[in-house]
Image (cartoon, helix red, strand yellow):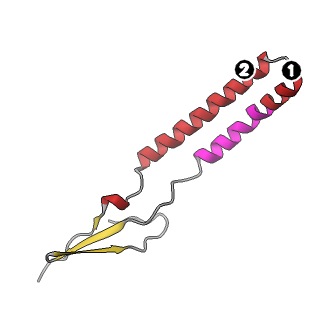
Amino acid sequence: MRKRAAKIVSVTSVRRALEEDIKGRSRRYLFSMIVRMVCFILFLIIPSWPVRIVLAAAAVIIPAIAVLVANAGREKGPAPTVVEQQGQIELYRNTSLGEGEFLR
């Protein structure tokens, strides 16, 4: 009896690593908070009231937007391609993995 080859995921079709995704989200969140701090500091320094109101509104709204962007979830990409070897021929086929499913 012949053993069936293990399923191998093609590297070119794999999504970004979870660690990279988290680092990217953290950077975007940090950048948003830096912009918020700049708005707040300019609010304290600039004497013009219309500009101060805009800066204060930005300093209040930016955190909510930053949290939504940071928690938006992972990027959507194509499902990984499974490579199965049968004899000397390699077959390439798409899998029908659903959201959150992984090959084992």
Query: Picture coordinates of residue 43 (x, y %)?
Result: 78, 22
User: Which quarter shows the C terminus?
Assistant: bottom left
Q: Is residue 65 magenta?
A: yes
Amino acid at pointer 1: Ser
Q: Is residue 79 above or below residue 88?
A: above
Amino acid at pointer 2: Ile
User: Residue reaching furthest bottom?
Assistant: 1
Rendering quarter of residue 12: bottom left
Q: Is residue 5 above or below residue 65?
A: below
Q: Which residues are magenta?
A: 57-70
Residue at x 14% of width, y 77% of height:
87
Label of residue 41 in the image: 2
Q: Is residue 73 magenta?
A: no
Q: Which residue is mark 1?
A: 48
Task: Tell me the chief SS of the magenta region.
Answer: helix
18 vs 53, left or right, is left
Residue at x 74% of width, y 21% of height:
42
User: Which quarter shows the N terminus?
Assistant: bottom left
